[in-house]
Image (cartoon, rainbow, N blue to C red):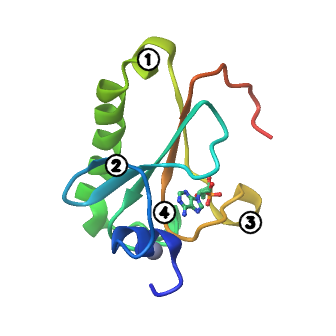
Amino acid sequence: MDDCIFCKILSNLSPADKILESDRVLVIEDKYPQAPKHYLVIPKKHISDMLSVGEEDRQLVWEMFNAVREVVRKKKSLGEQGFRTVINNGVYGGQTVDHLHMHILCGRPMSWPPG
Ligand code: AMP
Ligand code: ZN
């Protein structure tokens, strides 16, 4: 997708601070962090949102969850203090980049309900 910022990052056409990478998933630092630590778990395949995930993406979804586990292993304080994962979808969901991704937020207590 030519105008997708995450596809550009995945193609190394745009810079990002990479945390870890697997066959199907890249984890980067969020450029505009909303918590002391804010990471994005991005599938390498361009999928616009959760509603577009298909049965053929089962392995990919597992790798996204596994990437969260790997980040927690790498950044020990997440496991000790806890963290929040978020997937925003569509306009009311607050999605601003139309390439599926999971946020990992941590380093401060999270409130509920979210805004
Ligand atoms: P969402 O609003 O759920 O679609 O999340 C998109 C996220 O991507 C936001 O938290 C942005 O701060 C983040 N973001 C946008 N552009 C970049 C970029 N070039 N590098 C890293 N994160 C980005
Ligand atoms: Zn994309």
CB atoms of marks 2 and 3 within 8 Å: no
Q: Which residue, given by chain and number where applicable, does mark 4 sit on?
A: 100
Q: Which percent across, then down, holds residue 115? A: 80, 41
Q: Which residue is tagged 2?
A: 64
Q: Kindly identify which residue carries mark 3.
A: 91
- Residue at the top extreme, as displayed: 80
Asked whether, in this view, residue 94 is left or right of residue 9, the answer is right
Q: Position of residue 23 (x, y in %)?
A: 19, 59
Give coordinates of residue 108: x percent, y percent.
Answer: 64, 21
Query: Residue flagged by tag 2: what amino acid is it?
Result: Met
The image quadrant that residue 97 belongs to is: bottom right
Quadrant in the picture for the N terminus: bottom left
Above or below: residue 97 compared with residue 102 = below
Viewer-nearest of labels 1 and 2? 1
Category of crowding for the residue at label 2, using alpha-carbon neighbours closer than 10 angstroms: few (below 14), some (14–19), many (at least 20):
many
Q: How far separated are the C-alphas under marks 4 and 3?
A: 14 Å
| Residue 33 x, y percent position in the rendering | 62, 43
Residue most extreme to the front = 15
**Is 81 drawn above or below residue 7 in the view shown?**
above
- Describe residue 68's horizontal placement relative to residue 103 as left or right: left
Mark 4 or mark 1: name the one nearer the start of the chain: 1
Q: CA distance from mark 1 to mark 3?
A: 32 Å
- Earlier in the chain: of badge 4 and badge 3, it is 3
